[in-house]
Amino acid sequence: METLVETDKFIKNREELRTNGYTLFPGILSKDDIQKLRTACLDYFNKNHSFIYYMGGKTQSDAMSKISGIRFLLNHPRVSEVLKGCIDDVRFLHHSDAHLNMLNGWHKDITGYVKDPWEAKEGNESFGVYKIAFYLQDHLNDNNGFSLKKGSHLRRELGIGENVDLHTRAGDALLFDQRLDHVGQQPNLFERVMLRYGKGSDSSYGILHTWRKLNGKKDKMSVFMGFGKTNAFSEEFATNCIARQNRQNNVSDYKINSEVRNRLDEAGIGY
Ligand SMILES: O=C(O)CCC(=O)C(=O)O
C-alpha cells in the first residue's frame, strides 16, 4: 500500500523523467543542510590533496568515501523519498563526485560506462541509470548551473532537443537520466585559453581562482551521485564507474565505506 502512495506522489516526476529526461524537486534541502554541505566541501578542497584538478576546478570522485560531511545526503529523508519514489528497486551505483569551480562542455554522462544504453537487454530490461545533483548556491541570475537538451536521453546523437537552462536554487534536487545531453558552466574565452595552456595544473587553477575573485564570483560547488534501477545496465555502469574512480583516486580496489553502507541500509536503498 505504501508503495502505491509513493508512486502517486511522484507520478508527474516519473513521467517527466521518462519523456524529458529530467525532473526537478524544489527545496528538498534546508538552508542548514546547504551550509553543512558547503562547509564540508570547502574544508575538504582547502585542506585535502587527494582531489584532482580538472577543467579549471577541483573535483573529488568517490566523494562519499572521502568527504564524511556529505554522507548525511544518503539517508536524508526527503532525498531517499525522492529516489525511492522515482526509481523502481533503486540502488546506489557507488558513484559520487564533489566539484569546486569546475568548467565543462556538453556531454552525456553515460558515454564510456555502458556499451549500448539504448539496446533492449535480455528480458526486456529498460534503462534506468540516473544522477541526483545538488547545486550548493543559487543559479537564479546566472547560467552557470545546469543546462540540458530536453528529451536528448532518447537519442544517441549529441545536440538534439530544446535547450533548457535550469535556474536552480540551493536546496533543489535535480534527478536526470545519465543519457541526457547537459552542461554546467562553460568556459569563456579567457578560461578556454587557460584550460588549453595550463590544463589540469595547480597553476592554472590558481590563475582562474584569482580571476574569479577579481570578478566577485562566489565559489561554485555541487555534489552528484549515481543511482539506478537494480538491473544489468546499472551493474555495468557501477563496474565501469568504480574503475574510473579508482584510477582518479590512484587506488587499486574499492570497498564501500561502512558509514555509507549503514546510511543506505537505514534509507532502505540497495547498493
Ligand atoms: O559542473 C557542473 O555543474 C556539471 C557537472 C557535470 O556535468 C557532471 O558531473 O556530469
Image: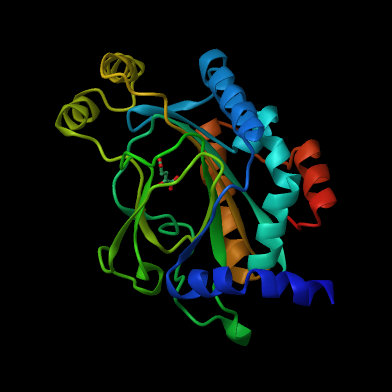
239 vs 75: above or below: below
> In what quadrant of the picture does the N terminus appear?
bottom right
Q: Residue at x 62, y 24 (%)?
A: 40
Measuring from the top left, give residue 23's x and y in whole percent.
Answer: 50, 62
Q: Looking at the image, which residue is at 54% across and 60% down? A: 130
Q: Which of the four quarters of the rendered structure image does ligand 1 lie in?
A: top left
Number of numbered tags placed on the structure image: 0
Residue 88 visible within the image: no
In-front residue for pair 111/184: 184
Q: How is the image coloured?
A: rainbow
Residue 107 occupies quadrant? bottom left
Locate residue 146 relative to residue 114 in the image: left or right.
left
- Quadrant containing the C terminus in the rendered view: bottom right
The residue located at (35%, 68%) in the rendering is 152
Question: Which residue corresponds to the image point at 52% horizontal and 15% vertical from the top-left?
Answer: 46
Q: Is residue 146 visible?
A: yes
User: Closer to the camera, 14 or 257?
Assistant: 14
Q: Relative to residue 33, is residue 79 depicted above or below?
A: below
Residue 101, x across and y down, in percent? 39, 29
Going by the picture, which residue comes out furthest to the bottom?
123
> Would you place residue 141 above or below residue 163 in this image?
above
Does residue 78 appear to the left or right of 12 in the view shown? right
Q: Position of residue 16 (x, y in %)?
A: 49, 71
The percent position of residue 165, horizontal first and vertical second, equals 33, 53
Check the image and report above or below for 60 versus 73.
above
* Figure quadrant of residue 252: top right
